[in-house]
Amino acid sequence: REGLGAKAVEAIRERRRACFAALGVLCQSSDFITDEFIGHLLAHLKSSLIKAAAKPIDDLPISIVLCLSRLFEHLHPSSIYFNNFFWIAMSLVQIHDSKLYPAALTLLESIIKTLDFHGCFKGKGMAHFCMSNRQGKLEPMLQNLDRLTGLSFEHDFSFAVAGHFLKGMKNATTKSLTVKVLSTFIQLCSEITPSNMLGYLAALLPHKGDDIGKLRALLTVADQSNSVEAQTTSQVLFNPQMVPDHVHAALLFTFLATILKSSEFEHEQIFIYKALEEGITFMPDAFPVIFEIITPKLSQVLLNSQNKNILSSSLNIMKAIFSFGLDSNSTIKLNKNYLDSIGFAGLPSSDHFNQNKKQQLIQIICMILDGALDF
């Protein structure tokens, strides 16, 4: 009897998954996509996530998220959910589950494409639009999420997005989709200030290596006399327009070092060591923020690397450390504790799926869904 009961429950769940998949295909019309309908889907999503908090996520919440990704483009801009759906999707991306992550990323891409289609980013850019719609009922819960993950959207929007994508960039099964969605962010973000794109570029450029023609064409550089074409690949990152202050420098150094920490691809390593070589000259007093990560990597290069470019950059980085006096404790410099002060203490550990955080993340995300349903 117990066996039959278990089979019956599984059969019901299978039918529910199939129903949500069918809804995503059959209801692709603004005539069907009402606030009441979306509310029911979000309620089902919340219920399915609660049940998955202490165990592996099954196909039911994934089916609901994929259903929403097909329906969002048909949601009318006057909907009570329209402006806030970005934060629902971004919250789902933060759940440390490699099965749910691609579905959440697909939903997020659908949302930013739809928001762009309706002109939401024109004039002030994606970051301004999304952060403006974060204010209100959802904000305290989203701030709790930022504190738990150690990635602060309030301090820097693009680095928070890229930080949450980094685990997908380092996972073989999700890397191509993550690169695709990051590229969509760059294409659609409509940022007026170049530094507002820095997080996206920090994630994509090491992956692209020197093949960045398309990315260069997308950059808006404020100082036209300092054209992107005249710069080296890594100088696209380390220049006054992209890195105007210590906050951006510390985040960029940390992001690159975090990728380098577990990089298995030589083209990524060549790019990052070259970028760090130029970065330490551009803003040396921000470089010590990555000493804990970069020092053992430089030692490994000197002992084991056969690549002349990596060796050359590493030696130049070490020379710069001594020439700028960064190895001395006699002056006050930025260190890893600085990341905590700007809300990014979690960035160095954001490059992998961490199951230990999943239950706490789901609890907060269910509260966010409750808040959205209460509009």
Image (cartoon, grey):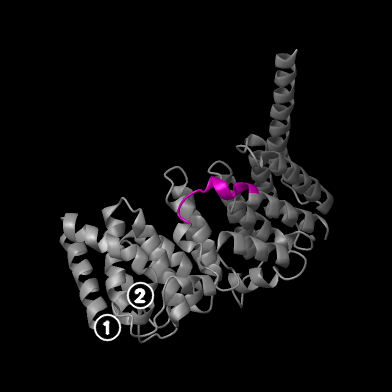
**In the image, 275: left or right of 313?**
right
Which comes sooner in the sequence, label 2 or label 1? 2
- From the viewer's side, name the closer residue of 340 and 253: 340
The answer to whether residue 311 is visible is yes
Q: Which residues are magenta?
A: 350-359
Identify the residue at image location x=28%, y=65%. 273
Q: Is residue 356 in the magenta section?
A: yes
Residue 115 location, x and y as percent?
65, 63
Q: How many numbered marks have been drawn onto this rendered protein structure?
A: 2
Residue for point 40% across, 60% down: 258
Q: Which residue is depicted at the point 45% across and 54% down?
A: 351
User: What amino acid does circle 2 point to?
Assistant: Phe
Please give the label number shown on residue 324: 1
Residue 21 at what x, y percent from top left?
68, 36
User: In the image, is residue 76 above or below residue 23?
Assistant: below
Circle 2 residue: 287
Q: Quadrant of the C terminus?
A: bottom right
Q: Looking at this view, is 47 or 103 the one in front?
A: 47
Q: Are marks 2 and 1 in contact (CB under 8 Å)?
A: yes
Residue 115 falls inside the magenta stretch: no
Q: Quadrant of residue 267?
A: bottom left
